[in-house]
Image: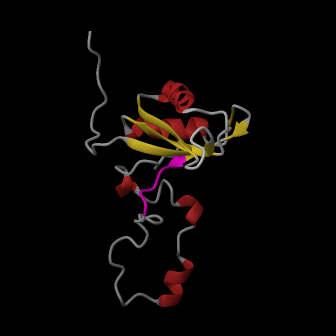
Amino acid sequence: GGGGGGGGGGGGDGCKLYVGNLSFQTVSRDLEDYFGQFGKVEDAQVIMERDDPGRSRGFGFVTFATKADSEFAITKTDGIEWMGRSIRVNESKARGEGGGGFRGGRGGGRGYDFRLSHSLRPDPSLASCSLVPLAKHVCGVVAAS
C-alpha cells in the first residue's frame, strides 16, 4: 500500500492554530476529534484556568502535521458554529512575533516620492494572499480560490 505522502513541506513543526470562543464544555479530546476531520492532528489542547484546573478558559490550540492541513482547517472552521459557539480559528502567532513580518518588502529606496508611496499602501484586507507569494512557507496564507 503506502500512498503518496504530500510533497514539499520542509518547515518542521507543522502548524499551530489558535481556536477561540470555545464552549466551556469543550475538552482537548473534542478538539482533537473535531479538527481530525481536516487533517492529521499532532496535538490539541484546551487551555484551563490556573486556579480552577477543571474549568476551560474558552480557547485552545491545535497543531497539524502539515501546513496544508492547517490552512484547510482554517477555511472550514473559522466562524463556524461548533458546540453552540461560533468559533474563531486562525494561525497561532508565537509570542513576540507581532503582526505580519512581511510588510515593507524589499528595500524601496530613499528616492521614493513620499506622497506617492503613501497612496499605494496595500489594502491590509488583501494582504493575506495575493500580495505575499514569497510567504508560501508561512502557514495561514490561504491561496485565493
79 part of magenta stretch: no
Of 52 and 126, the residue lying toward us: 52
Of 56 and 37, the residue lying toward us: 56
117 w.r.t. 38: above or below: below
Please provide percent x and percent y for residue 4. Answer: 29, 21
Please provide percent x and percent y for residue 22. Answer: 64, 41
| Marker count (numbered) | 0
Residue 94 lies in what quarter of the image? bottom left
Residue at x 37%, y 70% (from the top left corner)? 105
97 w.r.t. 143: above or below: below
Q: Is residue 79 left or right of residue 75?
A: right
Residue at x 46%, y 50% (from the top left corner)? 141
Please provide percent x and percent y for residue 50. Answer: 55, 49
94 part of magenta stretch: yes
Give the magenta range: 90-95
Of 111 and 136, the residue lying toward us: 136
**Would you say residue 88 is visible in this rendering?**
no
Residue 87 lies in what quarter of the image? top right
Chief secondary structure of the magenta span?
Answer: loop
Residue 34 lies in what quarter of the image? top right
Residue that lies at the very extreme toward the right in this rendered image: 84
93 w.r.t. 59: above or below: below
Residue at x 58%, y 35% (from the top left corner)? 76
**Would you say residue 46 is visible in this rendering?**
yes
Residue that lies at the very extreme toward the top in this rendered image: 1
State the colouring used for the structure image.
secondary structure
Please provide percent x and percent y for residue 21. Answer: 66, 45
- Quadrant containing the N terminus is top left
